[in-house]
């Protein structure tokens, strides 16, 4: 049994960020470095395949981290999730079970497991509260991924019950920022729009057509805010229930497209192909639990999109496939 004492984490204790090169993991690494953490550890998937149980167990035994964030996962957009559900289910289950079991063997003091808002039922009341979990059917296009993430939340809760370790889980909304995936096949809506509008602005196109009506509402959180929220939760939150991490406000996809168009300098017309499907009308997290824990988002969407566009333009040669 390890009792949680709120307050600053020790800056020189070994801290393992699983998935430290990803969108979320790299932002957490930057945040921790800027906050004076001096003993950070990460492994790329080619250095340590987290699906390899004995390799994970050996690595954890030699490192003996005091703190751990699990930001490694097989992540993708709707198309990838819908096409490869077995991969999303089994790879994420393997990564989670291997990392969390190895962390438990070493009695890692604080673990933060990251899931996603797709764990909540498709028809959950908006804004979505944490207690909506397991109250209804999931969105079928990413249900395999969501089930893996729900198993991760349960894994953390079970370790708390059986071993008394003060581990926690956080469920971020849609994230974006430096290090995002801009590939046509694998990207989420915001980086996909940045790529499309930036290409249109450069080639002087007079119009860009988007799918649907533009009316669905979505929430977007800059990944630097997400990283700050993660550190805040590790230092201040202890409880079995997962914590939603978002801004608490949403925008229409039309407003998002206009924000992106203005950030990249696209001056043509923004058009909508209303014969294409729209998806769920609204997805917004209730963030009152996070606010009660003492944290709220700082960056507005315009500044966040501009920051991401600048990163995208400066990193053309190093973009992910
Ligand atoms: N992006 C979002 O909008 C969003 C929203 C909500 C929640 N989340 C959650 O945040 C977490 C991280 O997402 P992300 O967007 O940062 O994903 P990401 O950019 O794709 O990064 C995932 C990381 O996981 C690592 N990884 C994957 N499979 C691995 C394996 N077998 N062994 C070792 N490492 C492996 C990758 O390592 P390499 O680079 O070395 O291959 C990569 O660094 C996920 O749990 C996701 O559900 C993300």
Image (cartoon, rainbow, N blue to C red):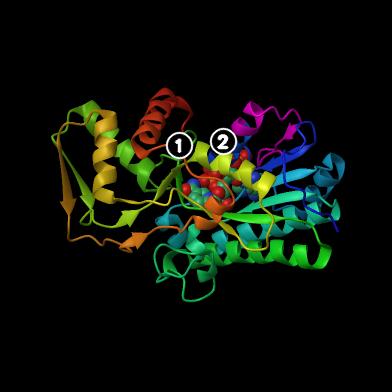
206 over 77 or under it: above or below: above
Q: Is residue 32 magenta?
A: yes
Can you identify the residue that label 2 sits on?
27
265 over 258 or under it: above or below: above
Can you identify the residue that label 1 sits on?
177
Q: Quadrant of residue 181?
A: top left
Q: Give the mark nearer the N terminus: 2 vs 1.
A: 2
The label on residue 245 is none
Q: Quadrant of residue 34?
A: top right
Q: Residue at x 80, y 49 (%)?
A: 108
Does mark 2's beta carbon lie closer than 8 Å to ligand 1?
yes
Work out which quarter of the rendered image holds the N terminus and state it. bottom right
Q: Is residue 17 left or right of residue 22?
A: right
Camera sees residue 317: yes
Q: Residue at x 63, y 38 (%)?
A: 20
For mark 1, give the secondary structure.
loop
Q: Position of residue 56 (x, y in %)?
A: 77, 49
Q: Position of residue 83 (x, y in %)?
A: 44, 61
Q: Is residue 288 left or right of residue 273?
A: right
75 over 302 or under it: above or below: below
Whole-Å distance between the Cαs marked 2 and 1? 9 Å
Q: Residue at x 53, y 40 (%)?
A: 23
Camera sees residue 75: no
Cβ–Cβ below 8 Å for labels 2 and 1? yes
Q: Which residues are magenta?
A: 30-47
Q: Position of residue 7 (x, y in %)?
A: 72, 42
Crowding at label 2, few (<14), some or many (≥20) Cα neighbours within 10 Å?
Answer: many
Q: Nearer the viewer, residue 210 or 87?
A: 210
């Amino acid at each position: 049994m390890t009792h949680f004492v709120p307050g600053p984490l020790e800056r020189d204790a070994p801290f393992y960020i699983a998935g430290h090169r990803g969108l979320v993991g790299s932002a957490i690494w930057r945040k921790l470095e800027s906050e004076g953490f001096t003993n950070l550890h990460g492994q790329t998937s080619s250095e340590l395949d987290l699906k390899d149980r004995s390799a994970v167990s050996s690595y954890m035994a030699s490192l003996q981290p005091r703190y751990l964030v699990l930001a490694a996962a097989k992540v993708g957009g709707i198309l990838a999730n819908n096409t490869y559900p077995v991969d999303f289910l089994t790879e994420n289950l393997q990564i989670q079970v291997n990392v969390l079991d190895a962390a438990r063997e070493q009695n890692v003091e604080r673990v933060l497991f990251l899931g996603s808002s797709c764990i909540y039922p498709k028809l959950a009341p908006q804004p979505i509260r944490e207690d909506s979990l397991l109250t209804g059917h999931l969105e079928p296009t990413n249900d395999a991924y969501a089930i893996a993430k729900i198993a991760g939340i349960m894994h953390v809760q079970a370790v708390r019950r059986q071993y008394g370790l003060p581990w926690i889980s956080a469920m971020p909304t849609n994230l974006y920022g430096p290090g995002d995936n801009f590939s046509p096949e694998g990207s989420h809506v915001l980086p996909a729009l940045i790529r499309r509008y930036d290409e249109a602005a450069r080639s002087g196109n007079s119009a860009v057509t988007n799918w649907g009506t533009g009316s669905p509402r979505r929430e977007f959180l800059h990944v630097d805010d997400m990283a700050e929220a993660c550190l805040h939760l590790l230092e201040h939150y202890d409880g079995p229930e997962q914590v939603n991490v978002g801004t608490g406000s949403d925008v229409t996809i039309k407003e998002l497209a206009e924000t992106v168009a203005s950030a990249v300098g696209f001056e043509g017309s923004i058009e909508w192909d209303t014969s294409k499907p729209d998806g769920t009308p609204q997805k917004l997290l209730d963030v009152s639990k996070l606010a009660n824990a003492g944290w709220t988002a700082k960056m507005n969407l315009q500044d966040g999109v501009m920051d991401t566009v600048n990163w995208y333009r400066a990193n053309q040669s190093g973009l992910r496939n």
